[in-house]
Every structure is written in structure tokens, then in C-alpha cells.
Amino acid sequence: MTKPSHFVALLVALLVVGCTGRSATRTAADSAAVLAASQQYVQAWIRGDTAAALGLVSNDIRILVSGVPDVAGPEATRKLFADEMATYDVPLLKLNHEDLIVSGDHAIDIGTYEEIQAPKKGGAPVQGRGRFMTIWRREGGDWRITRYMLNDLPVAK
């Protein structure tokens, strides 16, 4: 190789390494931010804080849950959250994040959940477990849920 060819090869290598490093750093930071937002969402449900939970969802939210019609948009989501939080306390909501894929302004969080819902008017607690898939979108620097899917699994014995 001639000296100009060495220079071009070195420049290309430095650009590739530099871009890869920034991309990996951004992806790691975005992954951490999505997991933090997910934890805020969980804590909102445990506290029964409808406003905090709604603050983490996008205006074009669609919720797909086993056994109920699809929930679409902020008003239907507000009603769902308010009704659930008025009916149940949630002393346990645990997410096991199995796969988190971040690409640009979107992230897909896949895993399993365990929860206990205690009826506020008395009665036996309801235990649930299942799979979840949440699609997050960066909106104005914050991560918000735009799609949320739950798939029930049999309760462990």
C-alpha cells in the first residue's frame, strides 16, 4: 500500500471504531433509561398512582390483554387504569426482563411478570403470571409505552 492508502485505511478504521463506540454507549444508556422507566411504571401500579402510570404511556397507546377487548388511546387507557386501581391494590408486581432490543427511538422489552392483586373490598388475592411485550418510544427525551401486550400463563403451583 502507498502512504495515502495507509492514511485512508487508518481514517476509515478510526471512523468505524468511533461510530461503533458512540452507538454502543447510546444503546446502553437507552437500555438503562427504558429499564428505569419500566421500574417507574411498576412502582406507579404498586402505589396505585394512576397519574404516574399514565405519564409513562404515549397518546397513541394500544394495550392488548388476554380476555378483554383492545384498549386504544389515552381516554380508554385512563379508564382502564383508574378502574383497575380503584378495584385492586397491587402489593406485588415483578417483571423479569428477558430481552431488551433498542434501535433508535424505539425499544422492545420482552419478559415475564408475576403479580398479586388484592381486592380493595375484600376477598382472596388474585395471583397472576404471564408474558409481556412492551414497545417503548422516545418522546421528547422520555421513554413512553406505545404498545403493551400481556399473555397469561398458568399460575405456578
Image (cartoon, rainbow, N blue to C red):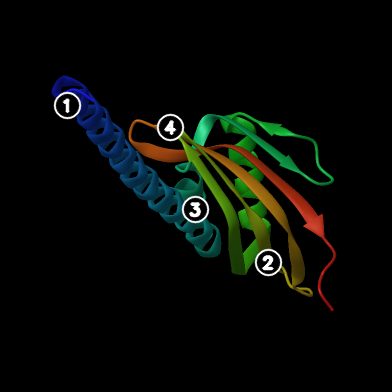
Q: Earlier in the sequence, mark 3 or mark 2?
A: 3
CA distance separating discs 4 and 1: 32 Å
**Numbered disc 4: secondary structure:** loop
Of pointers 4 and 1, the one earlier in the residue sequence: 1
Q: Is residue 119 visible?
A: no
Residue under the point 82% across and 69% down: 155
In which quadrant of the rendered view does residue 148 lie? top right
- Residue located beneath label 4 in the image: 104
For marks 4 and 2 on the same chain, the one whose residue lies earlier in the sequence: 4
From the viewer's perspective, is residue 111 above or below residue 147?
below
Q: Tell which circle, 3 or 4, labels the residue nearer the N-terminal end.
A: 3
Q: Is residue 59 visible?
A: yes
Which residue, given by chain and number where applicable, does mark 2 sit on? 114
Q: Residues within 10 Å of mark 1 (few under 14, many from 20)?
A: few
The front one of 122 and 35 is 35
Percent of width and height locating residue 145: 53, 39
